[in-house]
Amino acid sequence: MKNCSLALIAMVSMLFTSVALAERLELPKGMGGVADIGTIPCDVFNQMLVVGPQGTRLSLLTWADGYYYARTEKTMDELVAAAKQSGESWDFERLTDHFTEFCAANPEAITRDAVVSLGNELISEAS
Amino acid sequence: MSNSTPAAHPGKSKLWRPPIVGIITFVLMFFAIGLAHTMMVLIEHQLGQELTLKLSPLLGFVGIIMLWYGIKSKNENFQTWIGFFAGIIVWMCWVEFFYMWYGRENWGMLPRMDGADGLTVSGTWPEYMIMGSTVGTLLMMCCFYTFDKDTRCNMFLWFQRKLGLQEGLGVSTKKAKDRNYAIITFMETFFVTWFCYAWNLLCFDPGLVGVDNMFLAVNMGSVFIATIWSGFCFMRLIKFKRTSTALRYAIPVGNVFWINVEILGKFGMLTEIWVNPWKYTLEMSVMFAAFVVLIILLLMAPKKKSEVGGWNEQTESTG
């Protein structure tokens, strides 16, 4: 009986977990932008750039900052500072130009690919 | 549009009688709104977005110079045309383009997204999100016109009657000949455009009206009100004889009716050809040609003496 109860609890928990995982993160209704800009198609990113160029760039750069920290335990500032030593300085324009150029060339990719591509370039420039 | 003497008395013309004047001014105004959208797209395309946004404060002064020239004129008809075009130019440059710079560039705002997956860029771009927030300022200005005894706008006069203000405010100290129709038409064009934009933007804001059924209900209600309101005003407009008065009255009639166009566009029920002039070159060329012909017709239309400088005759209530 005890085993059955545990199994039932486990099943219900799994059901709720899967429901929670299936839910998409949504922004409050009136806001602009998307909740998870690192996972959108580059094609959508390109369209957002037309009418919100600076905000769209900043939004993905902020996402990239978190992504790089999770992967390397280094902040964007630290990565940029390291990369700076061996070449042209990385400012907001140059960093985000990398995203826009990548997505313009690869509209079928997702924005995370652009973030990974920039990360690789920063790391390769630092080494 | 010079200070010429009237070609003929409108009462003697067989063509320029109601409802011709009203219908022509309404169609003209309706086309003018579409073409103003096209003009913005063309300016942006020709100058590039960056240069357009930088030049827009200066371009707005073109409208102010026109207004200055119009205000000096004694010709009501000329004043009305100048006020109308100056209003459109100033709205375009000092509001639309300037908000565009603020929203897209300076503040780095993102467009509102639409669609089931939230990955479709909606028509609510950063500049329109800013514009929606100006509704409080708009209402404050509407309070001024509601409580101003010299206002001649029919809507505010109606408010004054319903609020029992007319006795307290007293009789207007200004007569028709004391009014400068360049600044009146300029302000009217500006405020009517602002009002209609705010109306549409508030109804399109999912943060205010929600989504799905509520969104549909609010916007269908909006279509109903806009159709009834503009229809009522159109019935009045077609009784007008004076082209200057009809032109001023047609500004709100055309704009309020245009609210339906924006809503139908939002629901994908019509193609907004006026924002894609490259794709719909023939259609927009025809629209532009018709607009020019309508302007010429109105300029050639016989005018009362009071419209071109003389104030000996009784005028209709002004827009």
Image: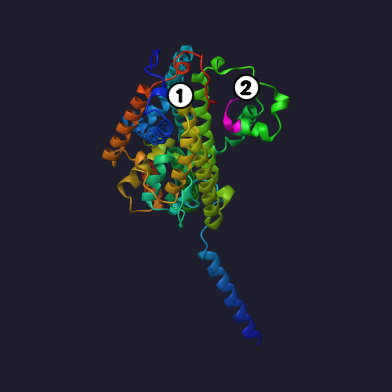
Query: Dot 2, crowdedness within 10 Å: few (<14), some or many (≥20)?
Result: some
Tell me if I can see residue B93 in this picture.
yes
Q: Quadrant of the N terminus of chain B?
A: top left
Residue under pointer 2: B150
Q: Which residues are magenta?
A: B150-156
Whether pointer 1 and pointer 2 mark residues with C-beta atoms closer than 8 Å, the reply is no
Residue B216 left/right relative to A104: right
- Where does residue A46 sit, x and y in percent of width and height? 37, 45
Subunit under mark 1: B
Residue type highlighted by circle 2: Asp
Task: Tell me which residue sits at (37%, 50%) in the image.
Answer: A42
Residue B275: which numbered mark, if any? Answer: none
Residue at image x 57%, y 28%? B153
Q: In this orientation, which residue lies closer to the viewer: B309 or B271?
A: B309
**Residue at the spot x=62%, y=35% of the render?**
B136
Label ID, residue B244: 1
Q: Position of residue B61 (x, y in %)?
A: 45, 19
Decide if residue A123 is in sight here: no
Disc on the earlier residue, 1 or 2: 2
Q: Determine the image quadrant of residue B291.
A: top left
Q: Is residue B87 above or below residue B195?
A: above
* Left or right: B279 in relation to B165: left
Q: CA distance from mark 1 to mark 2?
A: 19 Å
Image coordinates for residue B176, horizontal then vertical, percent: 55, 18
